[in-house]
């Protein structure tokens, strides 16, 4: 499941060489407007007819001569705290048991007795548990925020009665807020980078017969297992 | 239904490929803020915090605010665990002669059963004990050469709210047995007239022992944390004279160091009577205490000394973690002349000398801290050269335990002859290296400050942590600037980190 979510990823910052010209919170892009992005085959195996691309799930080691700051995966303490921060306090808990804490060793945190190296690779095992965590916290988050409230942190600008048909502006505003909260991306209205998220919401609502709860849950899960959440 | 959206993704992307952010050579202000927040606080920023960007830039005042937070201290603690490896949970501190086992809810010590009851597997009967006129438990003859006493109810120091059934022989409280044995010491295990003392204070259970080792590990965490919160000079981490104790640690120093398991704390590095009175079962409350002369910050903390139990291991960790100088042979290996003379002196032994010429004199800085333990050999009690130990060795008499344990005696090789009677750490040290022993780890730290290695490695470690990669020659200029910031700020770790996260390197995308 997580692997498929990589389809939403752009490979992080920096983006592929060819990019569309869009307004963002960063410096202006240099490529020509309207250029379609070149999609690496690993991100779109279905377009290449090969879902078992050999490089899928592999991570390039840091370039020993790299300059600047290397993008890397959150450690599990960062992940745990950030999940709770973006959801307004909801973590992957089973009763009083913090599941991420329970899985800390499996998820790469060393104990400095039997292991001394922190594994920060965004590997398949990490993504599997991230997927589980996302499903759990998003279900709970939507359960909590199904009723409009000033305390909502996710359904802030839209509620479950809104769709792109009934109130496109509310959907877009809510997506903008969620992208800022989860990924730190500040996107203006009409930004093409909002489109995949809007599509995810709209199509989920459509195939579920109008279930906006499912639509927002899909967006929530997608935001959490997207590389822009766990890589920084 | 739960995965409906996943099935939709390929369709969505096939219909319209994803729109990606532009190719940037440096982070946007938002991403910069997010990265700093995650690195310094371990959590993503709130939407309100993004509002604090000024013209798209992260304000230095916000970084200061985060550096002053407890969250940053916790992140610094987390990072320093990767340097100090402070986990000694696997260590056993208390002799099995003093550790209870539980059978049918009755506490007894298996190793003492033979002396108490003439059967190593026999514990007391499940009835209330009776006592003779001298207050000694009465053992009832079982007719087969064994005796059995009953139990008494005790509120042990590790669980003072619960009445616990303890075999009466094990629960004896006398300080000195009828045979004259001091019951707080190791010899008590073979004297049936001794027990575990009031509240069972000279004995333990594995759970209580675990709290002690956990406290030793946390002591190091707390030293780092307090240093960061108080913005004390970073050198104090390695040379400071304060540490943290909780109830289990105080109890250990007061009552359990005389009954060691595989690791020893004799002579105790702190005077238990000088420590604050803390509930021995309260493992959450830590108190900062001043430590006596000879301590060198975390480098002589019990959690460090037990994690690295030989002086070579201690020096090796220091060189790796704080000087960025791993002892590592060259890729091509070390050329060794097969005809070269062999010697037990590793500083000159062909092949070994590649590392040990440096490692041995460095390890000597821990020469007054016991190996396989955390005891301190006070110079007032343990002179560098001990005439008694020399005499017993050269005259082939049996040397007392203190000589054979801490001094060079009965050498196996004549190469040791010049060092007989000296503390073990003096072996093969050149005269100019001998002061290392008395200087302690602090002397090693001071040397590294003078020659610039400590500040350079401190800055390099912090930069590698925050940049997510090792530094290379291309970073030299910026590294020097960070070193200057660290030293120029009075060794403020916060100022160092601030300089790094606001640097061009941190913001530059590879």
Image (cartoon, coloured by chain):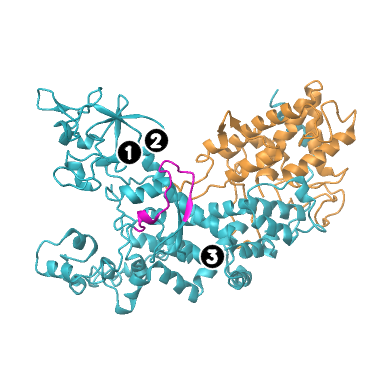
Marks 1 and 3 on same chain = yes
The secondary structure that most of the magenta stretch takes on is loop
As helix, strand or loop, the secondary structure at mark 2 comes to loop
Q: Is residue A45 visible?
A: no
Residue at image position (80%, 28%) is A203
Proximity of marks 1 and 2: CB atoms separated by less than 8 Å: yes
Disc 2 packing (10 Å; few <14; some 14–19; many ≥20): some
Rounded to the nearest angstrom, the CA distance separating label 1 from label 2 is 8 Å
Left or right: A76 with respect to B439?
Answer: right
Q: Position of residue B160 (x, y in %)?
A: 39, 35
Query: Looking at the colours in the rendered structure, which chain would you say is drawn in orange?
Result: A
Q: Nearer the viewer, mark 1 or mark 3?
A: 1
Q: Is residue B445 above or below residue A80?
A: below
Q: Position of residue B164 (x, y in %)?
A: 34, 30
Q: Is residue B283 magenta?
A: yes
Rounded to the nearest angstrom, the CA distance separating label 1 from label 3 is 42 Å
Tell me which numbered mark, 1 or 2, is placed earlier along the sequence: 2
The residue identified by callout 1 is B199
Marks 3 and 2 on same chain = yes
As helix, strand or loop, the secondary structure at mark 3 comes to loop
Asked where in the image residue B390 lies, by quadrant, the reply is bottom left
Disc ID at residue B160: 2
Q: Position of residue A12 (x, y in %)?
A: 70, 48
Query: In this structure image, what is the colour of chain B?
Result: cyan
Rounded to the nearest angstrom, the CA distance separating label 3 from label 2 is 40 Å
Q: Is residue B276 magenta?
A: yes
Task: Give the quarter of the figure containing the N terminus of chain A.
Answer: top right
Disc ID at residue B234: 3
Residue at image position (28%, 29%) is B152
Left or right: B427 with respect to B436?
Answer: left
Q: Is residue B126 visible?
A: yes
* Chain under numbered label 1: B
């Amino acid at each position: 499941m997580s692997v498929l979510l990589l389809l939403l990823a752009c490979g992080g910052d920096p983006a592929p060489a060819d990019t569309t010209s869009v307004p963002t919170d960063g410096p202006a892009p240099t490529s020509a407007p309207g250029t379609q992005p070149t999609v690496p085959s690993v991100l779109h195996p279905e377009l290449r007819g090969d879902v078992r691309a050999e490089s899928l799930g592999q991570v390039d080691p840091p370039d020993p001569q790299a300059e600047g700051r290397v993008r890397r995966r959150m450690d599990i303490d960062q992940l745990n705290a950030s999940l709770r921060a973006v959801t307004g306090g909801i973590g992957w808990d089973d009763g009083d048991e913090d599941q991420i804490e329970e899985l800390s060793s499996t998820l790469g945190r060393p104990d400095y007795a039997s292991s001394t190296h922190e594994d920060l690779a965004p590997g398949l095992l990490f993504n599997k548990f991230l997927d589980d965590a996302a499903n759990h916290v998003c279900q709970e988050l939507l359960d909590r925020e199904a009723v409009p409230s000033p305390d909502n942190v996710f359904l802030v600008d839209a509620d479950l009665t809104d769709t792109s048909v009934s109130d496109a502006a509310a959907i877009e505003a809510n997506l903008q807020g969620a992208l800022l909260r989860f990924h730190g991306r500040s996107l203006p209205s009409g930004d093409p980078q909002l489109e995949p998220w809007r599509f995810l919401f709209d199509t989920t609502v459509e195939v579920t017969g109008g279930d906006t709860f499912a639509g927002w849950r899909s967006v929530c899960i997608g935001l959490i297992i997207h590389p822009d959440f766990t890589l920084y | 239904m739960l995965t409906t959206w996943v099935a939709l993704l390929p369709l969505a992307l096939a219909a319209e490929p994803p729109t990606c952010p532009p190719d940037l050579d440096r982070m946007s202000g938002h991403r910069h803020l997010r990265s700093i927040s995650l690195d310094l606080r371990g959590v993503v920023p709130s939407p309100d915090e993004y509002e604090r960007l000024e013209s798209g830039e992260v304000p230095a005042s916000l970084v200061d605010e985060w550096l002053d937070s407890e969250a940053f201290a916790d992140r610094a603690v987390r990072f320093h665990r990767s340097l100090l490896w402070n986990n000694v949970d696997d260590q056993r501190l208390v002799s099995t002669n003093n550790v209870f086992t539980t059978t049918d809810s009755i506490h007894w010590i298996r190793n003492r059963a033979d002396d108490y009851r003439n059967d190593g597997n026999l514990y007391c009967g499940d009835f209330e004990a009776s006592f003779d006129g001298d207050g000694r438990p009465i053992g009832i003859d079982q007719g087969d050469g064994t005796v059995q006493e009953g139990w008494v109810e005790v509120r042990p120091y590790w669980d003072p709210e619960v009445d616990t059934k303890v075999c009466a022989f094990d629960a004896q409280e006398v300080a000195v047995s009828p045979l004259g044995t001091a019951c707080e010491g190791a010899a008590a295990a073979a004297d049936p007239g001794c027990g575990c003392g009031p509240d069972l204070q000279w004995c333990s259970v594995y759970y209580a022992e675990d709290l002690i080792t956990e406290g030793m590990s946390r002591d190091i965490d707390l030293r780092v944390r307090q240093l960061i919160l108080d913005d004390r000079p970073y050198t104090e981490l390695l040379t400071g004279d304060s540490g943290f104790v909780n109830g289990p640690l105080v109890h250990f120093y007061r009552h359990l160091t005389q009954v060691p398991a595989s690791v020893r704390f004799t002579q105790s590095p702190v005077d238990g009577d000088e420590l604050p009175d803390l509930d021995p079962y309260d493992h959450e409350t830590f108190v900062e205490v001043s430590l006596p002369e000879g301590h060198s910050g975390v480098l002589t903390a019990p959690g460090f000394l037990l994690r690295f139990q030989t002086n070579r291991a201690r020096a090796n960790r220091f060189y790796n973690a704080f000087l960025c100088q791993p002892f590592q042979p060259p890729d091509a290996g070390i050329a060794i002349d097969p005809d070269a003379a062999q010697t037990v002196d590793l500083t000159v032994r062909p092949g070994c000398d590649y590392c040990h010429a440096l490692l041995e004199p460095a390890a000597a800085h821990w020469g007054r801290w016991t190996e396989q333990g955390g005891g301190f050999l006070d110079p007032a009690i343990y002179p560098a050269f001990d005439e008694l130990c020399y005499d017993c060795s050269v005259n082939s008499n049996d040397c007392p335990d203190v000589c054979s344990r801490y001094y060079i005696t009965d050498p196996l090789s004549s190469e040791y002859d010049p060092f007989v009677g000296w503390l073990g750490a003096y072996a093969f040290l050149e005269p100019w290296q001998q002061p290392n022993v008395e200087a302690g780890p602090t002397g090693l730290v001071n040397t590294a400050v003078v020659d610039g290695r400590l500040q350079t490695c401190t800055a390099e470690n912090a930069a590698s942590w925050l940049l997510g990669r090792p530094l290379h020659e291309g970073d030299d200029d910026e590294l020097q600037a960070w070193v200057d910031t660290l030293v120029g700020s009075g060794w403020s770790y916060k100022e160092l980190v601030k300089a790094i996260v606001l640097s061009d390197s941190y913001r530059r995308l590879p």
